[in-house]
Image: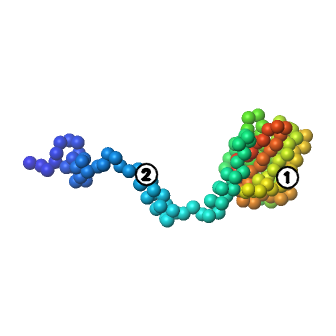
């Protein structure tokens, strides 16, 4: 006679030697999650700068603002051009019928709102507002200082507030 049981795999090559009664139906997922959190905190801790940036970004969260989503980033979406060096980064954000095109280079930041309209524009860096800019009647705005680190744009057009997704320069 063989040591193998019926055809369900018990006693076969994948048998771990434990009966089904050994498994607890009331497995404590909360304690497992806590143990995994502690292990991750020890083996792969979150960098302090990332925590600070996350807290600063949340502090700027504007409940009344619409979020303009990133729909194009030349770092990931553009086709590279042979021989081109120091090419500006092109970003496009959309929120409803508003489009924000932004060019980021070593010379600074250029942008345009479509449809063209006047607006106040703030370049956000953490909890404090950076440069306060004004978009002209054609929707154009510029800043001579390039953003460093994470940044976002807050646009005030009429009675509406739009904030772009946060980007790393």
Q: Which residue is drawn at 83% across and 55% down?
A: 131
Mark 2 burial class by Cα count in 10 Å: few <14, some 14-19, many 20+: few
Say which quadrant the C terminus sits in.
Answer: bottom right
Q: Nearer the viewer, residue 151 or 38?
A: 38
Horizontal arrangement in the rendering, residue 29 relative to residue 145 (left or right):
left
Query: Looking at this rendering, what residue extends furthest in the top direction?
Result: 97
Foreground residue among 92 and 65: 65
**Horizontal and vertical percent position of residue 38:** 47, 61
- Name the side, left or right, on which 80 lies relative to 131: left
Q: Which mark is residue 132?
A: 1
Q: Single out the residue that lies furthest toward the right.
A: 137
Q: How is the image coloured?
A: rainbow
For residue 30, the mark is 2
CA separation in Å, label 1 and label 2: 47 Å
Q: Position of residue 123 (x, y in %)?
A: 79, 52
Q: Is residue 132 visible?
A: yes
Please indicate whether residue 20 sits to the left or right of residue 33 in the image: left
Q: Of tags 1 and 2, which is closer to the observer?
A: 2
Residue 140 drawn at (x, y percent): 87, 45
* Residue at 78% from the left image edge and 37% from the top image edge: 98
Label whose residue precedes the other's in the sequence (1 or 2): 2
Q: Can residue 83 be seen in this view?
A: no
| Residue 45 image label | none
Q: Image point 75% across, 60% down: which residue?
A: 148
Q: How many other residues sit within 10 Å of disc 1, few (<14), some (14-19) or many (≥20)?
A: few
Residue sticking out furthest to the left: 1
* Image location of residue 135, percent across then percent down: 87, 45
Q: Is residue 84 above or below residue 63?
A: below
Q: What element carries label 1?
A: strand
């Amino acid at each position: 006679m063989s040591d193998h049981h019926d055809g369900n795999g018990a006693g076969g090559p994948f048998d771990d030697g434990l009966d089904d009664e050994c498994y607890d139906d009331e497995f404590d997922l909360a304690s497992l999650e806590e143990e995994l959190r502690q292990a991750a905190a020890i083996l792969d801790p979150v960098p302090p700068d990332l925590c600070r940036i996350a807290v600063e970004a949340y502090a700027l969260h504007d409940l009344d603002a619409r979020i303009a989503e990133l729909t194009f980033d030349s770092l990931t979406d553009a086709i590279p051009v042979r021989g081109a060096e120091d090419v500006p980064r092109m970003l496009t954000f959309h929120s409803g019928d508003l489009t924000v095109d932004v060019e980021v280079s070593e010379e600074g930041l250029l942008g345009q709102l479509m449809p063209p309209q006047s607006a106040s524009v703030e370049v956000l860096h953490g909890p404090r507002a950076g440069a306060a800019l004004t978009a002209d009647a054609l929707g154009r705005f510029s800043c001579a200082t390039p953003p460093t680190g994470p940044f976002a744009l807050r646009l005030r057009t009429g009675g509406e507030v739009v904030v772009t997704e946060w980007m790393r320069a």
